[in-house]
Image (cartoon, grey):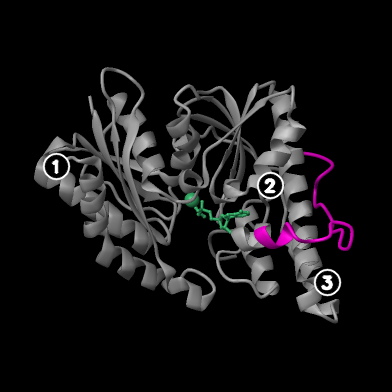
């Protein structure tokens, strides 16, 4: 039984470590969380993979030491190490995986590789120990947009996903069009708060049916409006508002549809886009009387090692262990995700 779990997350541009402590059979509690956001990427308007790997390499040992120090624990107190094994930037993931393997091997501790997406799903459980499946989850990040029916931890049924851009990616691309920095989501939410909702009403792609998403048409509509604007400085907040209203309306409408279709009484919002208080507010409003909306605070929704430790703790507690062949995988499939058929053609993987 792993009572003290060290979590490590290096899948993208956050170097993070966390310590989770479980005592007396109670749900595990967060003893520390350190997140170092790599700001080197801001100069480039997006994450540069090679720079991310190098920054993780440089920072990770100190970030892990700091997490242990803040928890008031020595390395010898750690029972298990949980590390993000994918999906993500493969070079960045490798840094965390190799470091975690070395720690676990040298100290003869349990090791568990965690799927980053599964980690996001566990984030609200850190703040709300009562939170448990069944629930419907809207998992929205920079790389993914998934609607999942979670009948139990480890059992995920894909209800719908995006056909093109991820929701967070759409926020980031529109932010670039508007001349805002990276990451775009927080900047758009801030600016949209000052915008007039009536000036730009953008299309809501695929809103009226199904549980799949598409954001590229909305992004193009914003691009045309930006090009047509005679004064971007004047229109910027209104454009941000119009885009955010459209994107969030689609997300909340699909979540609502999924909740009603499954009859679940809890809806979880997870992933970086769930940092949006506007999204959480709209979801709670739309689902009032139908389902409770569970969402973690922004620090636990953005990439962090606490959620990885929490998902890893659950897998370790069931007796799962990763062996020394654990590798980083950019496309690591979600554990427990039932096979599914999507109506659109799968992307071509080999030569034509
Ligand atoms: O989960 P995450 O931290 O990283 C990935 O695993 O991708 O998600 C990052 C994404 C970025 O695209 C960022 O723009 C978006 O989350 N995001 C937001 C907000 N805060 C972060 N999107 C909309 N509104 C926000 N307030
Ligand atoms: Zn993430």
Local crowd at mark 1 within 10 Å, few (<14), some, or many (≥20)?
A: few
Q: Is residue 64 left or right of residue 281?
A: left
Local crowd at mark 2 within 10 Å, few (<14), some, or many (≥20)?
A: some
Residue identified by numbered label 2: 278
Q: Residue furthest front?
A: 194
| Residue 112 percent location from the top left of the image | 29, 39
**Residue 309 vertical placement versus 266 (above, below):** below
Q: Which residues are magenta?
A: 190-210
Question: Cβ of disc 2 within 8 Å of ligand 1?
Answer: yes
Q: Is residue 100 left or right of residue 347?
A: left
Magenta: main secondary structure equals loop
Among the 4 quarters of the image, the one containing residue 105: top left
Q: Is residue 246 left or right of residue 156?
A: right
**Mark 3: secondary structure:** helix
What residue is at 74 percent from the left and 22 percent from the top? 289
- Marks 1 and 3 close (CB-CB < 8 Å): no
**Mark 2: secondary structure:** helix
Residue identified by numbered label 3: 225
Q: Residue furthest right?
A: 198
Q: Is residue 194 magenta?
A: yes
**In this rendering, the label closer to the viewer, 2 or 3:** 2
**Disc number placed over residue 74 in the picture, else none:** 1
**Mark 1: secondary structure:** loop
| Residue 316 percent location from the top left of the image | 29, 30
| Residue 348 percent location from the top left of the image | 59, 58
User: Which one is earlier in the sequence, the residue at label 1 or at label 2?
Assistant: 1
Among the 4 quarters of the image, the one containing residue 224: bottom right
| Residue 173 percent location from the top left of the image | 65, 67
Local crowd at mark 3 within 10 Å, few (<14), some, or many (≥20)?
A: some
């Amino acid at each position: 039984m792993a009572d003290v779990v060290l979590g490590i997350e290096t899948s993208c541009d956050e170097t993070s470590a966390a310590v989770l402590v479980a005592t007396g059979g109670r749900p595990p509690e967060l003893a520390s969380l350190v997140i170092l956001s790599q700001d080197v990427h801001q100069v480039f308007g997006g994450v540069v993979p090679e720079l991310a790997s190098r920054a993780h390499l440089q920072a990770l040992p100190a970030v892990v030491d700091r997490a242990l120090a803040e928890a008031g624990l020595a390395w010898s107190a750690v029972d298990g190490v949980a590390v993000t094994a994918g999906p993500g930037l493969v070079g960045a993931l490798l840094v965390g995986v190799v470091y975690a393997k070395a720690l676990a091997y040298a100290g003869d501790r349990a090791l568990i590789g965690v799927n980053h997406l599964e980690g996001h799903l566990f984030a609200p459980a850190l703040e709300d120990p009562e939170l448990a499946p069944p629930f419907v989850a809207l998992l929205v990040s920079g790389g993914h947009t998934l609607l999942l029916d979670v009948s139990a931890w480890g059992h995920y049924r894909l209800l719908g996903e995006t056909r093109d851009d991820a929701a967070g990616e759409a926020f980031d691309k529109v932010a670039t069009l508007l001349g805002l920095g990276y990451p775009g989501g927080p900047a758009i939410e801030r600016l949209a708060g000052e915008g007039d909702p009536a000036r730009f009403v953008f299309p809501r792609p695929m809103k009226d049916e199904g549980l799949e998403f598409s954001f590229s048409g909305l992004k193009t509509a914003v691009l045309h409006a930006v090009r047509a604007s005679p004064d971007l400085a004047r229109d910027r907040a209104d454009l941000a508002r119009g885009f955010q209203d459209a994107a969030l309306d689609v997300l909340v409408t699909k979540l609502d549809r999924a909740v009603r279709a499954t009859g679940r009484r809890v809806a979880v919002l997870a992933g970086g886009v769930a940092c949006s208080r506007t999204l959480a507010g709209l979801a709670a409003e739309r689902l009032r009387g139908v389902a409770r909306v569970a969402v973690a605070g922004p620090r636990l929704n953005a990439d962090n090692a606490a959620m990885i430790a929490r998902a890893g703790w659950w897998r370790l507690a069931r007796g799962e262990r990763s062996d020394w062949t654990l590798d980083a995988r950019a496309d690591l499939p979600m554990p427990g995700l039932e096979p599914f058929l999507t109506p659109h053609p799968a992307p071509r993987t080999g030569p034509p």
